Amino acid sequence: MKRRHFFGNLSWSMAALGLSSSCSNATEKDIVQNTKPDSLSADRIPGYRKKIKTTFSIGGTLGSNDRVVLALIGAGNWGTNLILSVSKINKNIEVKYICDVDDTRGGRAIKEIESLQKVKPIRVRDMRKVFDDQDVDGVIIATPQHWHGLATIWACQAGKDVYVEKCVSFNISEGQKMIEAAMKYERIVQCGTQNRSSDYALSARDYINNGKLGEVVAVNVYGLLNGPVPFNEKKSQNTPDTIDWNMWLGPAPDVPYSLSRNKSWGYYWDYSGGYALANGAIHQMDLARIVLGDPDFPKSVYCTGGRYLFEDKRDIPDYQMTTFDYDNFVLTLQVGEFSPYMLKSSPAIRYGDGFPEWKQNSTKIVIYGTKQVMYVGRMGGGWQVYDKDLQIVAQESGLFPLNAHMGNFIDCIRTRNQPNGNIVEGHKSAVLVHLSNLSYRAGKKQLIFSGDHEMITNDQGASILAAGTYRKGFEIPKEV
């Protein structure tokens, strides 16, 4: 079968910024460029750096038992799971709104929450109605990825605390603005990287810090989902009456309604950095950063891969291999949807005290030290350290930390303490996802990255793409 590579020959005209490796039909007049090329200079320090606060003075009036009023924005399967999880924590929580642009979503959440709290949540389409309600303390944003940044900024501007799903941003510049908004309005922003609330992640970090593993030389991160996954793109059709397609698109280019784009948005660059990478392996990448002591940014990145299995119209490759150079160690990432023999940890592992079968675990992290090797499981699964002759010399099991993470969000709404998955570290992990895709989309090039300036220094086209483009009316504000 012919192998397809979607990086192409990128044209860095204004219109092409939003269209590379995409099927969008937007025109130049529809698109606003987030950062002008002449401002992409090596002496530009990200503005958010001087605005980071470790404590907030605004708020803090809620007591430990005071009611917290929440709204869900994006009521798909995972959003529903999040709002039900936080409702069942039973810490005097009221869910006032279930918001989704699609009327066919949210029914289960409304029904089960009404049963729990004896008050029926209000269904709305437009998230701005939620932001206008002063009763709402916090929102859970579980939309497609392309909405995460703008929705978070709007929420902060409206005085709402935010739980935003991974990958928290759509591009590097957007993540910086999310931090600015959180700090300016002193809003709690908890990122949906739940491993930040995992005790075993911290104990694995301590084990490495104590020098028992030796010097870390190489880290291998895996995100090899079950597959192969065939895809048949549906033709554009009339927009159903049940959905506000303009609001669904939001910042993305204006295109006719398509069932494939609506339901399989994770296969299009317009809406996602990929199911396997931005919606999956971001968890492992963030967990790897925790265990390694939260290193900042790599010196360079190189990503290769392609669409190897199916001759279809997906933008997202079905395999990517990325190498990040951290100067004193190398981190590699493999993601894809082609391997039926690789499996995530089972519920028995994630909610029990056992350990994964590492050989065929699809989401493992392997950390190679000069003395020993460590295996780490994401979202439960714990960690184990091996010496010679397959000898296990240290280990700690761990549970799926979703409830702990959601509980931490609610606690921080009341206390104003910074959450476990704060937006600064969420941004740093998201940058790794963006760099991987930028390297691939720029033509499988090695990109040199300045961590001080958060800029690609050797490829102007990739730098512009990193800044992002937005449809008029849905721009990221220059001044948040």
Image (cartoon, rainbow, N blue to C red):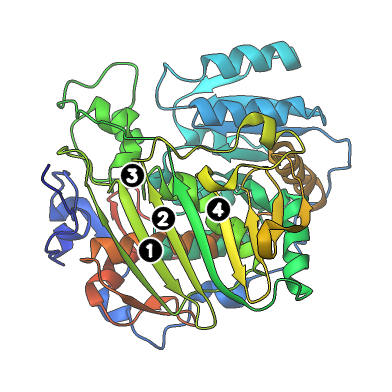
- Can you identify the residue that label 2 sits on? 334
Helix, strand or loop for disc 2 = strand
Q: Earlier in the sequence, mark 4 or mark 1?
A: 4
- Can you identify the residue that label 4 sits on? 284
Q: Using residue 289 as the reference point, say whether residue 259 is left or right of it.
A: left
Q: Using residue 65 as the reference point, say whether residue 44 is left or right of it.
A: left
Residue 5 location (% of width, % of height):
17, 54
Assess disc 2: are there few (<14), some (14-19) or many (≥20) residues with their C-alpha within 10 Å of its C-alpha.
many
Please state, as top left, top right, bottom left or bottom right, where the N terminus lies in the image.
top left
Residue type, numbered disc 1: Thr
Helix, strand or loop for disc 1 = strand
Q: How far apart, in angstroms, are the residues tagged by discs 3 and 2? A: 21 Å
Residue type, numbered disc 2: Gln
- Work out whether 220 lies above or below 284: below
Assess disc 3: are there few (<14), some (14-19) or many (≥20) residues with their C-alpha within 10 Å of its C-alpha.
many
Which numbered circle lies on residue 271?
3
Closer to viewer: mark 3 or mark 4: 4
Residue 224 location (% of width, % of height):
43, 45
Instruction: Kindly identify the residue that appears in the image at 57 percent across and 31 percent down.
Output: 72
Closer to viewer: mark 1 or mark 3: 1
Helix, strand or loop for disc 3 = loop
Which numbered circle lies on residue 322?
1
Image marks 2 and 4: residues in contact by CB distance under 8 Å: no
Image marks 3 and 4: residues in contact by CB distance under 8 Å: no
Residue 432 location (% of width, % of height):
45, 64
